[in-house]
Amino acid sequence: MTGGMGPQALVPLLERALQKGTCDAVLLPMRTPRNDSYAFVLVRDPLLLQRSDPLPPVQTVTGGRALSSLTRHGGGGLRILAVMRPCETRGAIELAKLGQVDLKDVTLITMDCPGTVPLPMFARGELHPSGIDFSDQSIRPICQICDLSCAAVGDLHLGWGEGLAPVLLPGNERGSKVLQDLGLKADHDASEWSAAAGRRAQARREEREVRLGQLRTSTSGLDNLMVHLDSCINCHNCMRVCPVCYCRVCTFDLKRQERSANEVLDLAKTRGHLRMPMDTLMFHLGRMNHMSLNCVSCGACEDACPAGVPIAQVFAMVSDRTQRAFGYRAGMDRKQRPPLITFLEEELEGEDEQRC
Amino acid sequence: MARSGDILVIGAGIGGIKASQLLSKAGHQVHMVERTAHIGGTSIKFEDVFPNLECATCMLSPLEQELLQDPRIHLLTLTELEGLEGSPGDLTARLRQKARFVNLDNCIGCGACYDACPASAINEFEEGLSQRKAIYVPCAGALPNVPHIDPEVCIRFKGEECVACQEACVFEAIEYAQEDKALELKAGAVLVAVGSAVMDAKQLKRFSYGTHPGVFTALELERLNASNGPTEGHIRLRDGREPKRIALVHCVGRRERTLCSAVCCRYLLKFRHYLRHKLPCAEVCEYHTDLCLPNKGDQHFLGEMAPGGEGLMRAEVVRVEGEGDSLKVVLSRDGQEFSETFDMVVLSPALIPSDGVAELAQKLGVELADDGFLAVKGVASSRPGVFILGGASGPKDIRETVIEAMAAAGEARRTIMAKEDGE
Amino acid sequence: MKARVGIYVCECGNNISDQVDIAALIPILEDAPGVVKVMPFRLLCSKEGQDFLEAEIRQEGLTHLVVAACSPRQHLTTFMEVSKRGGLNPYLLQMANIREQCAWVTLDRKEATEKAARMIRAATARVVRQAPLPEREVAANPDLLIIGVGISGAAMVRTLAGPERRLYVVDRDVAVTEGPLSGMEGVELYGGWQLEAVRGFFGNFEVTLSSGDSKKEIKVGAVAICSGSRTMTLQEMDYPGWEDPGVVLLPPDLEALMPHLEGLPERPKVLFVHCAGREKVGYCSGTCCLRSFRAMRWLAEKVPAAQLACLYQDICVPGRKGEKEYQGILGAGVRMTWGRLTGLSSQGRRTAVSFLREDGSSGQETADLVVMVPATVPDPGAKVLMDIIGADAGSTGFVEEGHPMLEPMATSVRGIYVAGSASGPRNAEASMLSASAAAAQIDAELRPGETLRLEAQTSQVCEALCTGCRNCLNVCTYGAIVYDPVAQTCQVNEAICRGCGNCVAACPSGAISVKGATYQQILQEIREAVR
């Protein structure tokens, strides 16, 4: 359960960090005072950390986005400890590769994530837990197939869960230094956690293969795909909340995408009928084309969709394939350059068929 | 401050083209003299070039187009040098231009005349693998895309009343009345870029080339592989069958000519790429004594073409004997002889001096080396003001040819500028 | 201003008119928005055709021109010149290839006519959205920076020095300043200096040189890299037992071998080991076999009693001279053994050379003197140099040529040239030749007193949309895009940009576009074509 042995244990650490001057500020989720919700808050006063909840049961604004608004124009030497889930962290790492987040003075702290509940249900009070445990089945479909929920992608990673002694693992030199500054020793024996995390990941991987395989079949062909996208209302919310959709103005919102009435009438004439507004399918395909290589499957899109489109799962289905084709998993390796700007002599191996 | 002096370039292969373009860029008027009716030389026979297996046409066509449209480059095809008088900076070249019998300005290359022509002959460009008409371009894509009439083949020139091509042409481009012309040009310097030729493999009887149909030369394989070639890119034996076992033989003629032809090891490896794509089920064995891979990227190229040394064997081919449809290749290795059977054997005959180079040397007033290539010190010939580049002075790949082309262009310019400075 | 588009359809003799019903096309084309005139013509590329078009532009007051004819590859330049002569910006012209892409490949006449109509209307829809582009020129600095004064560097200085351009020569060796090149007109020598930074572009480079704490800023139009190469040392090759006193490296000056020959027995066995270091570097150095054979010939004359042998993997002697030398040493009885060197060791007063044969078995030879023929590697300073300049060095560390066959003297950065063995192992003669070639190219491309014509169809960045992600910069092969950290957006250097469009494809925001090939232009063309 959150609290106690879980991520709540990070709070005293963060307090000490602020007091000692190990960092200038901490960025982490906090319970909102007026409404029972959560938001990322940049905290400088250690006392305020009391109200924080490093692992809320719901994902509101993704951590990467919060970090981007803070560090996009350079951190200015502001040392920040940022606490967020693995998927949010991976989003932040992808943004760093795209020049939208500056991680120079940011220490990323991640923790094992049991998942979150769907935001609309949480907001309406239909499903409003105060915490989530690792066996919870009410988590979002995208969380149910997340095999990276215990990925130690941060500079520091907290491994925890039922029956496990929590471990704090530095992922690199920066993480080690922070631990050192705080007078802490890294946990040496992480084998128990490692085994548990491995089991969780394996179970999720299998589930992911099954579910996405089913989805692949059920979206096969344009007609089938539209079954899932038919309810889309072109609000573009999915794009707006996506941590890796970083354009100032989405190309699909540009004036050049607009068509004159004549053009629209012409098209309607040719086809016999035309769905309005026009770019439902093209918008999703276009967004997939632009960012499936960066997609971290955080599910913010599906949370934000008012029309119930399983868009996170559709994107996960596509992104798994596109990323795998380039041997890339978004946000996992900070040194690996995004496939779009990488040139290799041999690419897309294994795509040729044997002809003999 | 532009100083110009005309420069004569003999040979419109890749070397001549690069040299001419450099000289034009520098402001000189260039006169290019090409013996055949088209430009591009030997390089346009290839589909791909080593070591990066780039499409040869994609590489060469843009250069050729630029050349043809360059206002400072004056191209004379079907033209040869008759004599060269004068001193550096002040040379006079006597040329003979054969009649094309087609008007270069009117013809747009539509090809209507080819179908109409009743006379055919062997197509030399296609290494004799196909026929062409009396009025023809050597292959699709040859530039300039204007045919010429071969008076040796055309029946009209043998006395018959034939106007088939003229009738087929709506642009009034056929001109039977054209005559060979004697021309004189003044130039400050001369660049000789006539390339090399390939040894006639028939001279090496032990390889059975010409006596058994399964034996091919490298250029024949190039044309078979070429998409604009006689078989549209299908590699087949002369009777149309697909070969199943192919032998590639290195160093053919190396000892006889006392010459390493510098390009064969690399092009034979390139053939591995052709064969892998066109005949993926065929078995290929490559026999070599040494592997001449002198450039920094060549070992890597070797690794790509023959991963782990697959298909390569260090053994000398002693002889090739016909056995019915097949060929027995007798090999020698560490003093032991053994043999293997193939249905196709591809030879890499040595590169030799170009046809007629001895006569050309005489007309140019330059010396030949003892092996028949034009004698050079760097790019300078034995006569001041005359420079030799590329295959004319010894076997070379495209890169070395281009380096020499630019060096020779630079030397030519310096010759002219020295003259202008009042030497 | 309202568009006045003129469409001219070439019959190309009968090439096009045979397959395309031009008469039927005309009413369809006259209908298109902006079109004020449609006319066929027999042969537009002919003199009459060109004069006709030029007159039409003026008489009809055309604002845009569509020429439906052959491939732009063949005559785009022609018709652009016609436009200019008619007073129309050449980028307000669009060609529709209704010959190669229509008449020549469509069997059915009705289909061909329909396709031609679509193609020409598409070209019209595009051309009305095209903007006039200026053809610009930029002043070019004819001065040259030469880095490295070995064989090729010195040759370049001697070839290019003159009153029309300044040559700045930089070499880390202090002695260069007072060396044989001092006193040459227009040549400034900087011995003991090195390159620190390069900014700008071809024709307008700003270079910072440094020496200790001193810095100097110079302006040049081009840079020639002549950093050369060197041979591997025994230590670098690191064969087991390399320290054995009987093992020497083949020296550049053969006289340096003499001391090693003293004290050897009367009929000394000298074993030349070829391909030394080849496995480590991954390439054949191409020049060493010939060097070794010449050394063998020299040695045979100096010490007639010597027994010469050679351990080799491949004999690489391309060209005319090499084979003669090779057959010469074979004729002189030099024993050739195929083998891959595995190690060296002392055996009494001799040295034992261990090797692997092709069949995998081990072999050994002993010799009184072992001469290692080493691989050639790039100058140690080359890597830093390439990092500063931003040009490509391949996996071998040698400078990559602009194009391996057609541009051997250029690099991936326009205006930065390479000569000598900096781009690959080369002997002295070949280095001098390449210097001559590079000098010729620089002389032709950067002529004193002339300006450089810039590409008109370059890309440009819309700052409002740019997020500074630098995708465009990362995919630009010409280094034409820079990131401005203050504005936090990317900018295109129009002097370098070649208009290839890689950047446009890589930008998800649509913030960058190529002039003359914008989103709207292409989109409208396609829309019209498939309507």
Image (spheres, rainbow, N blue to C red):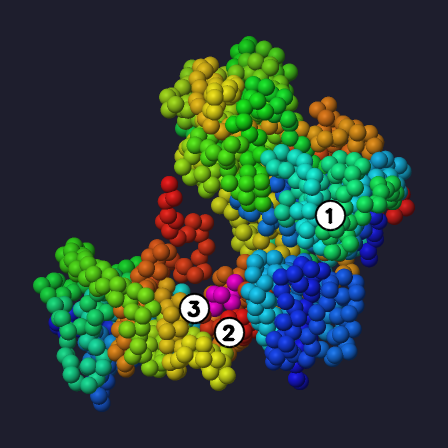
Q: Amino acid at mark 3?
A: Gly
What kind of element bears circle 3? loop
Location of residue C363 by image quarter: top left
- Please state the horizontal and vertical placement of residue C281, each as a whole percent of the image: 48, 38
Q: Do tags 1 and 3 sit on the same chain? A: no
CA gap, disc 1 and disc 2: 42 Å
- Viewed as shown, does residue C353 lie left or right of C428? left
Q: Nearer the viewer, mark 2 or mark 3?
A: 2
What kind of element bears circle 1? helix
Residue B165 numbered tag: 1
Q: Chain of mark 2?
A: C
Range of residues picked out in magenta: C502-507
Q: Nearer the viewer, mark 1 or mark 2?
A: 1
| Residue marked by disc 3 | A99
Instruction: Name the quadrant of the C terminus of chain B.
Output: top right
- Report the front residue among C330 and B146: B146
Cβ atoms at labels 2 and 3 below 8 Å apart: no
Instruction: Name the quadrant of the N terminus of chain B.
Output: bottom right
What kind of element bears circle 2? loop
CA gap, disc 1 and disc 3: 66 Å
- Quick check: is B62 in the magenta stretch? no
Q: Looking at the image, which residue is at 66% across and 84% down?
A: C2
Q: How many numbered circles does the render carry?
A: 3
Q: Residues within 10 Å of mark 2 (few under 14, many from 20)?
A: few
- Viewed as shown, does residue C180 lie left or right of A316? right
Q: Amino acid at mark 1?
A: Cys
Q: Looking at the image, which residue is at 59% across and 24% down?
A: B210
Q: Nearer the viewer, mark 1 or mark 3?
A: 1
Residue C26 numbered tag: none
| Residue marked by disc 2 | C531
